[in-house]
Amino acid sequence: MEIKAIKDIDSEKFEVLVINMFENEKTTQELANKFAIKKDKFEGKFCTTYLLHTLGQEKFDKILVVGFGKREEFDANRCREAISKATKKLQQIHCKSACFDLATELDYGKSATLGVSIANYAFDKYKSKKAPRVEKIYFTKFSEKEVKEGNIFANAMDFTRNLSNDSAAVITPKKLAEVAESLKGITTRVYDKDEIKRLKMGAFLAVSQGSHQEPRFIHMKYTGKKVTKKIAIIGKGLTFDAGGLDLKPASSMLTMRDDMSGAACILGVMSALSELNPDIEVNGIIAACENMPGCKAYKPGDVLTAKNGKTIEVDNTDAEGRLTLADALCFAEELGVDEIVDIATLTGACVVALGSTVSGIMGNDEKLVQKLIQIGKKSGEKFWELPMYDDYFESIKSNIADMKNTGSRQGGASIAGVFLREFVTDKVKWAHLDVAGTAFIEKPHNEFIEGSTGMGVRTLLNYICEK
Ligand code: BES
Ligand code: MN
Ligand code: ZN
């Protein structure tokens, strides 16, 4: 699909002209009036659409009017949502090319481009009959620069969504490593099973044991021309989470191919960096494996030693994500970075607490947490801070090791948070994003269809690119 900024509506040929209307305001565009919008009382309510036929009187076949809602409530996020609504309407009428000639003063080119692209996404790789998609979109009022940045973000999201929607049979740990190695402008080092042993990642290795798919530890690195800051971003990379010997029931296992959504997010982010060229060093880290109940599987009661020497009693083999992240966090801190952000489909408890549109966030540095919440808000991704009081550690105290990997079911997202905190020191700023509810959704919501949402890509890219 092509999305580009053009000078005016005469610069390109297209089938549908899209214009906007704020609620209860007269449209400033004569065209809409000419084709009788007044008579039909279209009110311009947020995300409503209205289709007019030009009956051969214009060089385009149709005019689509999209409601922008109340002018005082309009912002970049509402712009993205309204434009994605219009895009879905364009798909419905099997339109292949359209031009948005919007009456807005602000340059929302990036949001608008994302709105089109997110709405136009379909995972139809395995379908004989492909989903209808718009092929060409033009914007007259937005700058080339904003639309270009929107396209880079949009491609990163598509990349992430394709990885996380695909089957576990295809997206194996080895495949994730290959994807990492194929990224432009990124140096990648992949560690195999023996090397993971040598790195002393006893927790990660244990999780991987029950599967015939071998684990891969992936370290990607992007270095900007100037390096003002060094960060690490870590993604949970469980290419399938059956639960291990503490096997999940069938209904919970159904979507567990999505348990590498954190990893997919990191790969999407890394794929965009050589185009965005931020002045920063970004280390992308993924501990990729499967959690299966094979005959070599790790067992409840096993004691594991993580990379930093701390010992963990396995209480439940289905709390595997935190074990893989423990070693990844130690590895990241050893790189000498200033900040670490991990993103993980970590706990069902977070889904219970926050639902499928808000992600959990925790961390050891309030400033970093608040910054990510703010950037998230602007990016159209919602985060809510969950507490990490020491009380939460009580239930994971062990009689035989430094800690257990699970304790009480109550406050499960926070317990996972305080567990992870054991694997970073106070010397590094760290934030943890729990996207178990938001990375992969069961029903369509706003601009998203069911399945992967590319959660985290926009927030992390904006965080990396902020000056
Ligand atoms: N991958 C799951 C968490 C999850 C749940 C992701 C729902 C997406 C949707 C994680 O590994 C897990 O199994 N967590 C357990 C932890 C429990 C055993 C303490 C959970 O949340 O039930
Ligand atoms: Mn699990
Ligand atoms: Zn998991």
Image (spheres, grey):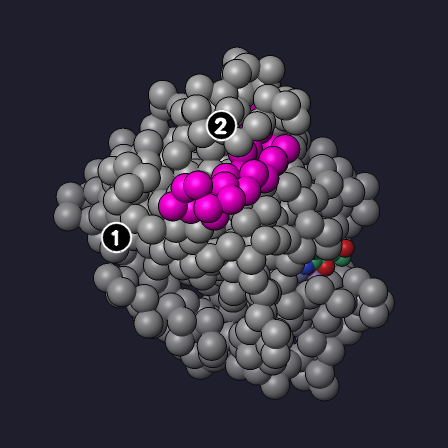
Q: Is residue 352 magenta?
A: no
Q: Secondary structure at mark 1?
A: helix
Q: Of marks 2 and 1, which one's residue comes earlier in the chain? A: 2
In the image, residue 406 lies at what x, y percent? 73, 53
Residue marked by disc 1: 275
Residue at left offset 83%, top offset 69%: 250
Q: Secondary structure at mark 2?
A: helix
Say which quadrant the N terminus sits in. bottom left
Residue 269 seen from this side: no
Residue at left offset 21%, top offset 42%: 279
Which residues lie in the magenta part?
Answer: 47-69
Residue marked by disc 2: 34
Q: Please state which of the two labelled residues, at mark 2 or mark 1, is closer to the viewer.
A: 2
What's the distance in space between the residues labelled 2 and 1, CA to CA? 43 Å
Q: Is mark 1 within 8 Å of ligand 1?
A: no
In the image, what residue type sits under mark 2?
Lys
Residue 102 seen from this side: yes
* Ligand 3 placement by image quarter: bottom right
Q: Is mark 2 within 8 Å of ligand 1?
A: no
Q: Which sits in the foreground, 388 or 312?
A: 388
Residue at left offset 61%, top offset 53%: 92
- Name the quadrant containing residue 297: bottom right
